Image: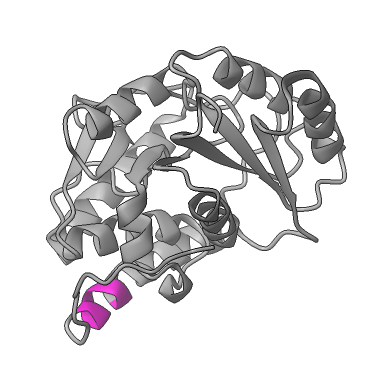
Amino acid sequence: MNHSKNRMVVIPTYNEIENIETVVRRVMSLEPAFDLLIVDDGSPDGTALKVRQLQDEFGDNRIHLLERRGKLGLGTAYIAGFKYALSSGYEYIFEMDADLSHNPDDLVRLWQACAVEGNDVAIGSRYIQGVNVVNWPMGRVLMSYFAGVYVRFITGMPIMDATAGFKCYRRTVLETIKLDSIKFVGYAFQIEMKFTSWKYGFRLKEVPIIFTDRTKGTSKMSSKIFKEAFLGVVQLKVDSFFKRYHREVIQYR
C-alpha cells in the first residue's frame, strides 16, 4: 500500500489538453500525498495520451486512467470514478475540475475537514464567506448564487453552494447512498449528491475557497445542463417524500 492510498482525487476530462498536465503536476506535489484518477470521455485532443505520459513519469500507482467512449456526462464519470476508488480501497475520495478553477492546494483543507474535524462531506464553497469567484461575468455569478438560494428554499438543505463540484467524501458516504440510483448527469448531479448525503444524516461542512474561472479550454456549461438542475431540484424534493433513508453499506469490489 503506497503512502497516498487513503486519498484519491477523481477528475473527469473532455478536451482538457491545455490544463491536464498543470493540474496533475500540482496535485502530485501536495503533502500529504494524493493519488489521481482521470476519467476521460474519449477526448479527441489527446488528453488521455498526455495522462499516459504522466503515468510513465509518476507511476500508474499514483496516476490512474479510466478511458470511456464518448461524452457520457459529468455525473456518470464521477460515479465510475467513485466505484473505482472504492474498489481500490481509498478512504477519502475527492471531486475536482480539470480546468484549474479549483485550486489543488485546497484539497488538503477539504481532507482535513473530514479526517481531522470529523465531517463526512467537505464542500469547497464559493459562497460560505461572501462571494469568492474570479473571472466570471456578473450575470453568471448572480445565476450561480441565486441557484443556491433556490435549492435551499426547495429542499431545506442548509448549504450555501449547492452546485459546488469540489468535494471530499468519506468512503462510507459513497458506500451508503447507492451510486447506481443517482439520476442526474449535469450540474443537478452535484445537488443530488449533497442532498442525498444530507438526507442520510451525514455531516456536511462548507470550506471557503476562491473559485477562478478557466483561462484555457472551453466551458462545458449549457442551457440544457442549467434546465436539468432547475427542474431536478423539485424532483429530488418530491422523490424524497417516498424514500426511506436507511443506512446500509454497499461494498464495491
Position above or below: 150 against 9: below
Query: How far from the left and from the top, in percent, is residue 109?
Result: 31, 22
Query: How far from the left and from the top, in percent, is residue 80?
Result: 59, 59
Position above or below: 181 against 41: below
Q: Is residue 236 located in the magenta-colored stretch of the structure?
A: yes
* Residue at 54% in and 33% down: 1
* Residue at 26% in and 58% down: 197
Looking at this view, is 40 or 226 the one in front? Answer: 40
Name the quarter where the C terminus is drawn. Answer: bottom right
Tell me if 53 is positioned left or right of 209 in this view.
Answer: right
Q: Is residue 69 located in the magenta-colored stretch of the structure?
A: no
Position above or below: 225 against 110: below
Tell me if 33 is positioned left or right of 203 in this view.
Answer: right
Residue at the extreme bottom: 242
The residue range painted magenta reads 235-240
Within the image, what quadrant is residue 172 found in?
bottom left
Q: Main secondary structure of the magenta part?
A: helix
Residue at the extreme front: 1
Identify the image's colour scheme: rainbow, by chain, secondary structure or one colour. one colour
Within the image, what quadrant is residue 131 found in?
top left
Within the image, what quadrant is residue 36 found in?
top right
Query: How far from the left and from the top, in percent, is residue 14?
Result: 72, 45
Query: How far from the left and from the top, in percent, is residue 161?
Result: 28, 42
